Amino acid sequence: MAKIPTVAIIGRPNTGKSTLFNTLIRRRKAIVSDTPGTTRDQVAGLIEGEELDYLLIDTGGMGGGTADKELEDDVHQQSVLALEHADLILFTLNSREELTRNDLEIIDILRKQKKSHVPVILVPTKCDDPRTIDSVLPEYYSLGISEDIIAISALHKTGLPELRSTIEEKLLSLHFERSPDLKEDAPRIAIIGRPNVGKSSLVNAFMSETQRGKSPLLVSTIPGTTRDAVDTVIKYHETDYIFTDTAGIKRKKDTKGDIETYAYFRSVKEVEQCDITVLVLDATTPISRQDKRIAGLAVEEGKGLVILMNKIDLVSTEEKKLRQQEIELQLQFCKFAAIIPVSAETKEGLLKIFDVIEMVQRNRTRRIPTKELMDWYKTAVYGQPMAVLAKSKLVTQAEEVPPTFVIFVKDPKQVQVSQLRFLDNSIRKTFGFEGTPIRWITKRA
């Protein structure tokens, strides 16, 4: 299966990494703030370029400079890991400031820890006046890190076309190409969840006897056994499904050592690249804050979601009922997702998963004709306290996945979150959309 190249943005805090990331992926995803150290975990975004696709990673700031010293070392280490596993590196420097000790420390890390064949593009940021860059270019070249220096202003969009084309040029020179995997009909399904909830056991239970004999996945009662993401093609009723068993996603403060941090990094990447996430919960333990965080990651990324309540063979009928009620209560923000009680050990409930996955995949790409959409909308807002939404004359569905609806109103700032939540509930009652998040966009008419 072809590998998607990874491009990592690194630099000390407050050099414009997140602003650059948001501009390149053309949507606001990373938090942008003047406070150094705002980005903690890596944020990933898949970019479909002119000639090939690549995964862009926004890392936390390296080299210190934040007020939160407790997390600073961990953030730095996660950024170093991203650097070590990247296929191309964008190194940001604040062009408005002199080089700092932290900048020089990062340069030293680049020299010692990046792979020798990995290109570096030096990106001076915040170059709102391009004439000012000429005076500092000799100093940047003298660093000996890169011959490719592209000054940008994310705010004014200057330098960005050159940066995009240079990124693709460098990746193509490393013999990467557009991955056909992204265009296949077979849905990619990421099995996600905390460590030791039975993710690998579930994938093993799906596999045929022949598959298990040739390439069994590692199954263990030791939390965190799976360190990397593993693809397995499962055929059911002549349809192929690509299952990815990911390393368990831990809270960042519980992630110890390079291997576990890299496992977290890979799991986040797999969620970004998949079509549908299958969140595995342990029926023998209460819902945790981390379970909520993992479910939120899938919803935020706009992925289809199926919830499996595993290990039901270890609980009584009454306990199973109580656990399902707890899941419904604690995960209300993803109540559109089906909850399926299963047992990897006895295989109870497993075959139900494929019908649900088929339904979710259809709903993720489903389109509602504009006339039907307008008829529903007029009925939904009639007699409701919807303010400017009640006066809207046009609602359309955008060409995006997950389903995204655009409402044109006189003043988008007057639209309240509770009103959009009402529309979300209403459209689901009318058209379904089980298993997929829905996006709402308000634009000025």
Image (spheres, rainbow, N blue to C red):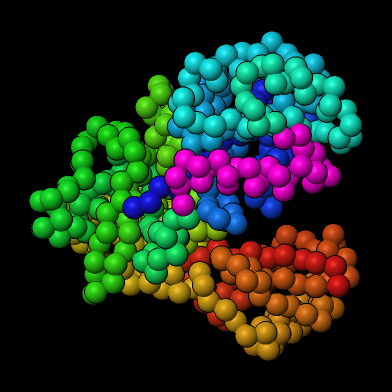
**Which quadrant of the structure image shows residue 123?**
top right
- Tell me where residue 139 appears, x and y as whole percent: 75, 17
Instruction: Please identify the residue farthest to the top as the structure is shown.
Output: 101
- Tell me where residue 346 appears, x and y as whole percent: 16, 56
Relative to 306, say whether 271 is above or below.
above
- Tell me where residue 299 appears, x and y as whole percent: 54, 55
Q: Is residue 42 visible?
A: no
Residue shown at the point (62%, 71%) measured from the top left:
399
Q: Is residue 209 visible?
A: yes
**Which quadrant of the structure image shows residue 398?**
bottom right
Q: Is residue 390 left or right of residue 301?
A: right
Residue shown at the point (51%, 46%) measured from the top left:
172
Question: Is 272 a magenta residue?
Answer: no
Residue shown at the point (38%, 72%) measured from the top left:
358
Residue shown at the point (54%, 27%) measured from the top left:
79
Q: Nearer the viewer, residue 372 or 423?
A: 372
Magenta residues? 150-177
**Where the C terminus falls, by quadrant?**
bottom right
- Tell me where residue 131 appears, x and y as whole percent: 89, 31
Relative to 163, say whether 326 is above or below.
below
Relative to 373, say whether 400 is above or below.
above
Relative to 184, say whether 322 is above or below.
above
Q: Nearer the viewer, residue 77 or 291?
A: 77
Q: Is residue 77 left or right of residue 230?
A: right
Question: Is 176 a magenta residue?
Answer: yes
Q: Nearer the viewer, residue 403 or 384?
A: 403
Q: Nearer the viewer, residue 274 or 3?
A: 3
Q: Is residue 242 left or right of residue 268?
A: left
